[in-house]
Image (tube, rainbow, N blue to C red):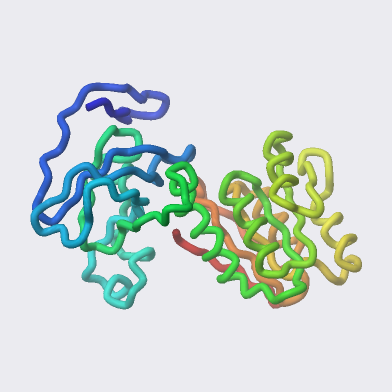
Amino acid sequence: MKAALFYGAGDIRVEDVPIPDLRPDQVQVQVACSDLHEYTKFSGIITKVGADAGEWALGDRVVVEPVISCKKCYSCTNARSNVCDKIGFIGLSGWGGGLAEYINVNAHDGFLHLLPDNVSLEDGAMVEPLAVAMHAVQASKLVVGGTALVVGAGPIGCFIVKTLLGQGASKVIVSEPSAMRRAMATRAGAHHVFNPMEDDVVLECHNLTGGADVGVNVSFECAGVQKALDQALGSLMTRGTCVNVAVWDVEARIDMVALILKEKTLTGMSI
């Protein structure tokens, strides 16, 4: 089969590799659609079923939750496999991935999900990033009528916008330097969209929520850069909550005094 193999930064090669042998407790999925970020989120169609794979059937349309967990640590044994001590991800940590024609998936780990008939394979590939967005909004403890800032309007940032609106946010503000992504945020329903390269996003958030002594109730850092985190924290009202969603490549700098004096909360979330 054809598969895209990662050899290093900027070095991805499409090569012929063997189709992996199927274990009795696995199903084989023909990959149909993959996400555009790390190619770990994908949907497909079951083409082979192992003898001990349970009730899965040929032709089932599925989405694969890309978590690899140990099933033994405290988190795993308490239904929190998304924060497993040894967490890995299909495509990044092994097991093939969304840029191979076929992948074998364990049938009984709970990470294989049947798509309803009214959900396309294309939409199915977006189930995982949508779940991340919903988890982030839940972690923020947004209340109906609350206000929010989303910093970074990539796929997950735009899904957060949609989720905030669905949960009753009265005002959703987005900060995004890319014109294309600002347009995506507007299409997603954001009430106000700013370019942080030109606009003072923190000032705009305070102006839109009642003044310098107010601010948004919740914010979401979806970019993984210092300026984005500074905006997300600086825009918050007293006792507001910032949810860090992005995966960072460098260590972040946090003004702890600013958090303390306004009793702000900064929380992280996994997938």
Instruction: Answer above or below: position of 87 versus 96.
Output: below
Residue 230: x and y in percent read 69, 55
Residue 243: x and y in percent read 60, 64
Q: Residue at (71%, 72%) from the top-left corner? A: 240
Q: Residue at (87%, 71%) from the top-left corner? A: 213
In this image, 139 relative to 189: left or right?
Answer: left
Q: Residue at (15%, 38%) from the top-left corner? A: 20
Instruction: Answer above or below: position of 158 versus 171.
Output: above
Near-viewer residue (206 or 99):
99
Quadrant in which the C terminus is drawn: bottom left
Residue 111: x and y in percent read 31, 59
In this image, 203 relative to 53: left or right?
Answer: right
Q: Residue at (31%, 47%) from the top-left corner? A: 90
Near-viewer residue (254 or 163):
163
In this image, 227 relative to 121: left or right?
Answer: right
Residue 208: x and y in percent read 87, 61
Q: Which quarter of the picture shows residue 254?
A: bottom right
